[in-house]
Image (cartoon, rainbow, N blue to C red):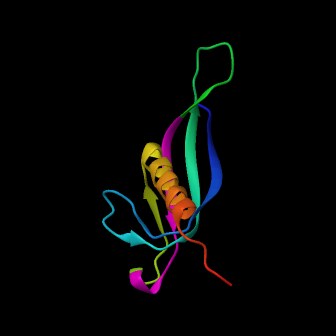
Amino acid sequence: MLARTKHRRVHFNEPFVIPDFGETVPPGDYDVDEDEELIEGISWLAYRRVATFIKLPATPENKYRMRIVAIAPEELERLITVDRHRAAISPSPRS
């Protein structure tokens, strides 16, 4: 079976909590990997997502351990949407 991994970077303006992880994650840029496998038996190329992971950086709070955490793709998209909504309604700092 053929598989591929898609990489992307997402940005969070606010701290967020990954369900089932039980830890507040600071704002910043995060790498996301999405593993997909080829759907066989059809006449065109198509892939299905089989796993999504977000990479959490090493910090003093987590004893300098980088972690890769599985997350449901729908939950990741929900967290991104909530963060963008909050950023859109937050008053911008005055200079």
Residue at the spot 53% in from the left edge and 62% down from the top edge:
89
Residue at the spot 45% in from the left edge and 70% down from the top edge:
15
Magenta region: 49-61
Q: For residue 26: magenta?
A: no
Q: Position of residue 43 (x, y in %)?
A: 67, 13
Closest to the observer, 19 or 43: 19
Closest to the observer, 89 or 56: 89
Q: Quadrant of residue 46?
A: top right
Residue at the spot 42% in from the left edge and 48% down from the top edge:
75
Left or right of 24, for residue 89: right
Predominant secondary structure, magenta span = strand
Q: Position of residue 41 (x, y in %)?
A: 59, 14
Left or right of 44, for residue 64: left
Q: For residue 52: magenta?
A: yes
On screen, residue 62 above or below 12 = below
Residue at the spot 30% in from the left edge and 66% down from the top edge:
22
Which corner quadrant holds the C terminus? bottom right
